[in-house]
């Protein structure tokens, strides 16, 4: 192998997979690791049939494996920074390797679990780790496919030769890292709140998304007035339908066990609220300052910029909604707050990955 | 009547200060912005690309609905105006609430009340006399501001953070104002310059000369490392400053900014083409050289050949408008008009350098307009390199930066500092400790319990020896 970082990232891919399996076992076998759930309410209690396996503290092992994976990927990121510096002849001080898809993916797979580890130590809710380490594993696997993300370092393009690259992208990634932990927590929250009905709700959400992408947008794109109106109406009906389903599920629900939900709800809120300043400042302020230096304007409605704004706005709505409607509102609006967190993360995914496949953008290098 | 107006004013006030309105407006703005990411906007898309993508009718529909310029459309601006109003009203309302809160001191709460707090902790036993002093010292070590009222210790931390969110909201408004100032009084233009060109700017008492420009590659590589242009500011015929600008490093002078923004070969603006001319019977007249927007005479035929547009990558839209798909020499074509001595146009045509395009075009043209007196082929082309400079005047810049600074401050303060208050009621038989935090965070429980433990470890409460029962 020509580049040590590539080897290290391969190793960390394996390591994250092992970590993911540990977290999965922790959730499935449901051993709370002593200090585990602060709420004291029964978590997902394993049946005694699983015997020996469930006596192992999978949660503790998962955390250890996570620390191990983080050590490897930290080494990988450092190695990568040096390789990129060499390839760019050290034209400017580059602190972080963030100039290609490969580099951003591997960087994400380092920072997202790192932030999660912090949040895990804070809130002691380990079920969230399944999503986060799973995501890190997927990112590294995608980066490992050479056709998608070639791993050889190339010189940094002129537009990226600025220390704002480090500041802007680091803040964005930190924001996304917190949001990822928040989304993992949202999944756990939703599962605890809806249990099996969650499949129904996720199915409905998926149906809404698929219909939007494959029916609403193409119908709108015919650009014939009646069909456009029909597509807007269809979209409104889809949203209303999902709202109605939520209302229905909430009406049907058993009394809510708040003491089980509140710690995880607070984890969602804290992750999202901690991520928001990074995301908004990194995108709107630092992105703006850099865009002014490189492209002569703070804000130009470039698709990626706009998608970032949409994401920030969705999280702003989430925070205002939580503030006004309250997290303990047992009605549909209270439930909607958690779903806004889901919507926010969908927007993150769109702004971060999805948009690159839709439109040509000034941001096309990432 | 006055009551009626007062009622209306009141209704308007509560309408504009409602957070529900904010949520609805932000959602709508987000939805429209999302649409704006899916449809390419006209600021960075050419008309011909729209037509190539959506067809003429589709493009007209998009334009009628202002979807090609959604961020300048009346409905988006209307939403933004409404949002700005809403934000201003909410900020005002919140600010006065913060102010009232700021002025409201912590006050004595009877111990029965303290026990009902979500975070509360009771130590019972005999309390030693210097307990208040030592608890005060402990709280002060933790950064609390402490005072005493009726034998109750009132401690709090970070009261000022209540203004963080107001600062953030006000800064958003400041940035909007800065943007408006730049939009209304600013100025921006894009200039294509060749070596030695002097750029004069309206309203500026100086000119800028392009001394030279070049690009650098990475060593042993085709990858461009940077584009640079050496600019000299000339004021009253004197050279004032010379600076080499590059991407990410503009020249700033007297409120004007010069950015390295493009670089390349100026095909469309200044191509120099070599054309081979043939008579209709196929005999060659010769090869001639002309530049775009100019032409040459052919004395032997007594004609003038005018060179029109040059397209490096010729393509046609659905309604047969010619445009250049890219700026690379993929399918070069030049528009040629031929006039006789009296200035009457004899013919016009496109000349191509790709033979199959030439044949295709000539066949198509012959079918439509019949036999042409001459045939023109494009046999050679060159064009000068150019440097593209984005030039702006940005009077809103200080306002925007000021707003940015306080956005950061406000947001950080609001998200990372939460106002805490602790009451410690010391009486003879017990100490009651209660606390609150903004947003009533449950995770405060841990911190609160640690604080309680520390107070307990001070040893100011002693338990009486249990009496031995014999």
Image (cartoon, coloured by chain):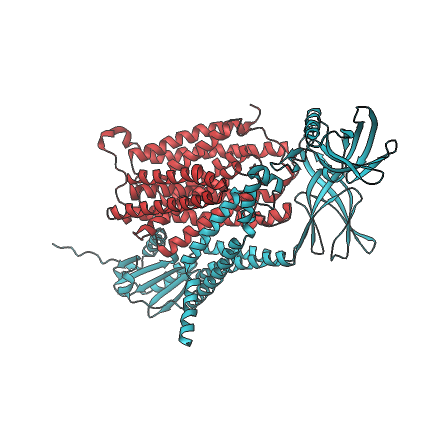
Chain colours: A red, B cyan
Quarter of the image with the C terminus of chain B in it: bottom left
Residue B53, position as x, y percentages in the image: 57, 37
Q: Residue furthest right?
A: B299
> Is A294 placed left or right of B455 in the picture?
right
Residue at the spot x=34%, y=33% of the render?
Answer: A24
* Residue closer to the observer: B108 or B401: B401
Residue A201, position as x, y percentages in the image: 33, 41
* Residue closer to the observer: B340 or B60: B340
> Is B71 placed left or right of B348 in the picture?
left
Q: In this orientation, does residue A298 appear?
A: yes
Up-down relation of residue B4 to residue A70 (above or below): below
Residue at the spot x=45%, y=46% of the render?
Answer: A229
- The answer to which image quadrant residue A359 occupies is top right
> Is A215 placed left or right of A89 in the picture?
left
Quarter of the image with the N terminus of chain B in it: bottom left
Residue B341, position as x, y percentages in the image: 85, 38
Q: Residue furthest bottom?
A: B2
Up-down relation of residue B458 to residue A72 (above or below): below
Q: Give the total of numbered labels.
A: 0
Residue B6, position as x, y percentages in the image: 42, 73
* Residue closer to the observer: A241 or A184: A241
Q: Residue furthest front?
A: B370
Q: In this orientation, does residue A126 appear?
A: no
Residue at the spot x=50%, y=27% of the render?
Answer: A145
* Residue closer to the observer: B462 or B335: B335
- The answer to which image quadrant residue A189 occupies is top left
């Amino acid at each position: 192998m020509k580049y040590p970082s590539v080897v290290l990232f391969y190793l960390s891919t394996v390591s994250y997979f092992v970590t993911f399996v540990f977290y999965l076992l922790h959730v499935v076998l449901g051993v709370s690791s002593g200090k585990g759930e602060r709420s004291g309410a029964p978590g997902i209690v394993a049946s005694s049939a699983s015997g020996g396996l469930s006596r192992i503290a999978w949660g503790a092992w998962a955390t250890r494996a996570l620390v191990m994976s983080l050590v490897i990927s930290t080494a990988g990121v450092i190695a990568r920074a040096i390789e990129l510096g060499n390839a760019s002849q050290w034209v400017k001080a580059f602190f972080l390797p963030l100039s290609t898809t490969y580099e951003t993916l591997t960087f994400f797979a380092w920072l997202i679990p790192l932030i999660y580890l912090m949040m895990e130590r804070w809130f002691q809710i380990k079920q969230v780790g399944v999503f986060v380490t799973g995501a890190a594993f997927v990112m590294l696997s995608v980066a490992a496919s050479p056709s998608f993300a070639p791993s050889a370092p190339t010189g940094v393009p002129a537009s990226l030769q600025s220390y704002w690259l480090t500041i802007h992208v680091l803040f964005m990634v930190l924001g996304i890292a917190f949001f990822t932990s928040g989304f993992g927590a949202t999944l756990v929250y939703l599962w605890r709140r809806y249990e099996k009905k969650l499949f129904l709700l996720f199915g409905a959400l998926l149906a809404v998304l698929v219909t939007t992408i494959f029916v609403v947008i193409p119908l709108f794109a015919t650009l014939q007035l009646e069909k456009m109106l029909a597509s807007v109406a269809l979209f409104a009906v889809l949203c209303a339908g999902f709202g109605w389903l939520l209302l229905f599920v909430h009406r049907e629900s058993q009394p809510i066990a708040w003491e089980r939900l509140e710690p995880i709800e607070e984890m969602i809120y804290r992750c999202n609220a901690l991520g928001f300043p990074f995301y908004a400042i990194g995108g709107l302020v630092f992105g703006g300052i850099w865009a002014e230096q490189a492209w002569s304007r703070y804000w130009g409605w470039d698709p990626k910029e706009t998608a970032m704004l949409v994401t920030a706005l969705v999280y702003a709505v989430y925070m205002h909604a939580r503030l006004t409607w309250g997290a303990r509102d047992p009605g549909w609006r209270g439930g909607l707050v958690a779903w806004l967190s889901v919507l926010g993360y969908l927007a993150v995914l769109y702004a971060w990955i999805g948009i690159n496949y839709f439109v040509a953008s000034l941001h096309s290098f990432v | 009547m006055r009551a009626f107006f007062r009622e209306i004013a009141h209704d308007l006030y509560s309408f504009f200060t409602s957070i529900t309105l904010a949520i609805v407006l932000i959602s709508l703005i987000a939805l429209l912005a999302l649409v704006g990411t899916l449809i390419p906007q006209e600021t960075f898309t050419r008309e011909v690309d729209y037509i190539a993508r959506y067809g003429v009718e589709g493009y007209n529909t998009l334009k009628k609905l202002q979807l090609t310029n959604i961020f300048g459309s009346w409905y988006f601006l209307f939403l933004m105006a409404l949002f700005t109003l809403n934000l201003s009203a909410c900020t005002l309302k919140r600010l006065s609430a913060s102010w009232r809160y700021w002025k409201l001191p912590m006050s004595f709460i009877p111990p029965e009340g303290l026990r009902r707090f979500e975070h509360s902790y009771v130590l019972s036993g005999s309390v030693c006399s210097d307990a208040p002093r030592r608890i005060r010292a402990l709280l002060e070590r933790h950064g609390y501001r402490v005072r005493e009222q009726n034998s109750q210790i009132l401690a709090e931390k970070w009261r000022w953070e209540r203004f963080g969110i107001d600062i953030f909201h006000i800064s958003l408004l400041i940035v909007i104002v800065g943007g408006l100032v730049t939009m209304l009084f600013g100025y921006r233009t894009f200039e294509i310059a060749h070596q030695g060109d002097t750029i004069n700017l309206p309203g500026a008492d100086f000119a800028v000369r392009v001394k030279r420009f070049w690009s650098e590659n990475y060593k042993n590589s085709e990858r461009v490392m940077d584009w640079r242009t050496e600019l000299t500011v000339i004021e009253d015929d004197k050279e004032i400053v010379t600076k080499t600008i590059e991407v990410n490093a503009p020249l700033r002078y007297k409120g004007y900014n010069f950015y390295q923004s493009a670089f390349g070969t100026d095909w469309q603006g200044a191509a120099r083409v070599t054309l081979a001319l043939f008579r209709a019977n196929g005999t060659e007249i010769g090869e001639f050289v002309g530049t775009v927007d100019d032409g040459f005479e052919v004395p032997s035929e007594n004609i003038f050949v005018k060179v029109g547009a040059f397209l490096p990558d010729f393509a046609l839209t659905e309604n047969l408008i010619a445009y250049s798909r890219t700026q690379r020499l993929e399918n070069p074509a030049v528009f040629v008009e031929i006039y006789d001595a009296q200035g009457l146009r004899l013919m016009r045509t496109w000349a191509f350098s790709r033979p199959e395009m030439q044949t295709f075009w000539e066949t198509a043209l012959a079918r439509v307009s019949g036999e042409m007196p001459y045939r023109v082929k494009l046999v050679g082309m060159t064009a000068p390199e150019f440097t593209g400079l984005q030039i702006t005047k940005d009077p809103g810049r200080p306002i925007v930066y000021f707003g940015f600074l306080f956005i950061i401050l406000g947001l950080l303060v609001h998200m990372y500092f939460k106002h805490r208050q602790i009451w410690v009621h010391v009486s003879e038989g017990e100490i009651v400790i209660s606390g609150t935090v903004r947003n009533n965070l449950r995770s405060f429980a841990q911190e609160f319990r640690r604080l309680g433990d520390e107070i307990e470890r001070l040893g100011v409460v002693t338990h009486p020896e249990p009496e031995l029962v014999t």
